[in-house]
Image: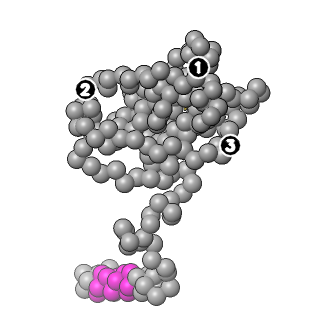
């Protein structure tokens, strides 16, 4: 092919390629729905897929205090304290905290939970200057652990009660990455009569 013919061939190719691109752009402009949303006006959490890994929560009402999630966490950011109440012979959970600001959302803690108590939510808006706000406490008061019905091991329980609201630690010093959080103060466990009354 001569140089002149190659020159005009290149021009033709450039024009056709440009027209092809414009055709696709125009088609999307008029026929395709937008795939972006106007955040934050649009509530993105409602659009996220079911298995989205947002903030972790623990539905403490169905937590057995088995420690499996804490042992599975590769960076040890789940802190649980369970002790037996000698008076009632019940195991009481005093503390269930997650240092969410360190979480890498790997999901290992959720995989072997016998009740499905710990799970991800679609909530993701956690930007803050105070890391203490991402130190989440799930035990609002000492309470007997959930007893998984026999034979239901591995089957997620159905939580009828709504999860207790997550408490955060507003003190920035509590959130220092290197600092180990101070253990929660243990109030005297409620007697079985009080538990029944509540
Ligand atoms: S998602 Fe991973 S890093 Fe986060 S608490 Fe669970 S096991 Fe630990
Ligand atoms: S029941 Fe689930 S959330 Fe509770 S300690 Fe065991 S593994 Fe963790």
Rendered residue at 44%/66% (across/down): 43
Task: Nearest to the eye among marks 1 and 3: give it.
Answer: 1
Region rendered in magenta: 8-22
Tell me the residue that label 3 is attached to.
Answer: 158
Q: Secondary structure at mark 1?
A: strand
> Is 11 included in the stretch rendered in magenta?
yes
Drawn side of residue 126 relative to residue 162, left or right: left
Q: Please, what is the dominant secondary structure of the magenta stretch?
A: helix
Rendered residue at 59%/29% (across/down): 194
Indicate which disc, 1 or 3, sits on the residue closer to the N terminus. Answer: 1
Task: Nearest to the eye among marks 1 and 2: give it.
Answer: 1
Could you say where residue 91 lies in the image, as x and y percent from the top left? 58, 20
Q: In the rendered view, would you say 153 is above or below 135?
A: above
Drawn side of residue 126 relative to residue 42, left or right: left
Tell me the residue that label 2 is attached to.
Answer: 178
Residue 71 appearing in the image: no
């Amino acid at each position: 092919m001569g140089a002149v013919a190659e020159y005009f061939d290149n021009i033709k190719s450039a024009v056709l390629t440009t027209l092809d691109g414009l055709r696709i752009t125009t088609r999307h402009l008029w026929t395709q729905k937008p795939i972006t949303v106007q955040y934050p006006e649009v509530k993105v959490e409602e659009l996220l897929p079911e298995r989205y890994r947002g903030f972790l929560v623990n539905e403490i009402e169905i937590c057995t205090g088995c420690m499996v999630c804490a042992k599975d966490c590769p960076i040890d950011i789940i802190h649980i304290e369970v002790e037996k109440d000698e008076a009632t012979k019940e195991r009481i959970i005093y503390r269930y905290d997650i240092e969410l600001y360190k979480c890498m959302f790997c999901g290992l803690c959720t995989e072997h939970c016998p009740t499905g108590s710990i799970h991800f939510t679609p909530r993701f808006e956690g930007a803050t200057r105070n890391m203490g706000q991402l130190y989440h406490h799930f035990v609002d008061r000492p309470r007997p652990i959930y007893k998984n019905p026999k034979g239901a091991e591995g089957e997620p329980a159905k939580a009828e009660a709504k999860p207790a609201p997550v408490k955060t630690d507003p003190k920035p010093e509590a959130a220092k990455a290197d600092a180990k959080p101070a253990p929660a103060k243990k109030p005297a466990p409620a007697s079985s009569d009080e538990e029944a009354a509540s």
